[in-house]
Image (cartoon, helix red, strand yellow):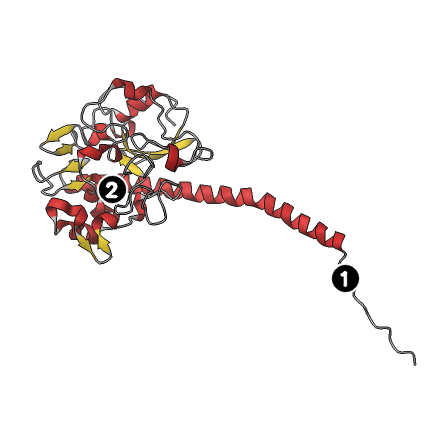
Amino acid sequence: MQAPKSLTRRAFTLIELLVVIAIIAILIGLLLPAVQKVRAAAARMQCSNNVKQLGLAVANYASTYNDKLPGVIVYQDSVPPSNINASLHFQLLPYIEQDALFQKGLVSPASTWSATTPTGTVQKTFIKPYICPSDASVNSTGFTKARTDWVSTSYAGNYQLLGTVKSGSARLSAYNIGNIPDGTSNTLLFAEKPGGCTSDNGSLWAYATAANGQYLAVFANDVSYAASAFSLPMFGWPNPATSPPQDSCDTGRAGGFHTGSVMAGMADGSVRGVSAAVSAATWKLAITPADGNPLPSDWN
């Protein structure tokens, strides 16, 4: 009886191996852009949700204090409801499920930011809803190149709505949630902006002083502002994909972290992505609560 022939396996040739590697490389090249788009879309959705949370926080704040809007800065020498030195973002902590941190800050009412927490101080506390995941000007813990002792935020309140009334050292709102002349749907409440740039200290969410008002306002750092400011580009950097935000952004202005748009939250709680093509005139209408005009079609 004849013995069966042994089976031998032919090895891959070098050319066949190179072809397989090339095919895998092509597939990876095709998949990467898709993966990046999915990540960008997820980050954009998270950012939109953050802005939504801030809008809801303001609405809940107003319902707590007889429709009063929070000020961009409150001080102990200002009118009620606050008898603390605090930033806009600090005032909103109880309404974004951060009441424990808020209570820690109240232990030191004259300097809420320096109050001790289990992990350090209030000013060093990372607040997830305050950071856009696409904001490359801050690191994963919320610090910037310039400051590693204060955590920043990627969102700024509209100074023209929340800060035009001086009360001692405070900057308060001239309006209640129900008496904004242009209506809540036509008035900007929050907008994205870079958390930090190499040229400044950054947008420190717990820092309560008008001296560094650019992190509290969308574009102005005091009650008065120059009309020429409206002729400047709306965005801190027009194209995040090609302009490194940590080097080229301007924390005095709104800045988009998503290619071609910036997330804007209106006083009625709605959120929209505003195109980089929006005109300076339209941006002015959006941030001005009492101009008496509806928003044009380029506000989308």
Direction from residue 99 to residue 148 in the image, left or right: right
* Quadrant position of the C terminus in the picture: top left
Question: Which residue is labeled 2 in the image?
Answer: 205
Name the amino acid type tagged 2.
Trp
Could you say where residue 167 lies in the image, as x and y percent from the top left?
10, 31
Of the image marks 2 and 1, the number of the one nearer the N terminus: 1
Position of residue 278 relative to residue 262, above or below, is: above
230 versus 120 height, above or below: above
Is residue 177 visible from the viewing direction of this image?
no
Mark 2 Cα-neighbour bin, 10 Å: few <14, some 14–19, many ≥20: many
- Depth order, front residue of 209/187: 209
Locate the N terminus and report the quarter of the image it occupies.
bottom right
> What residue is rendered at 9% in x and 32% in y?
168
Q: Which residue is mark 1?
A: 11
Work out how far the residue at label 2 is from the one at label 1, CA to CA, in angstroms. 63 Å
Q: Quadrant of residue 100?
A: bottom left
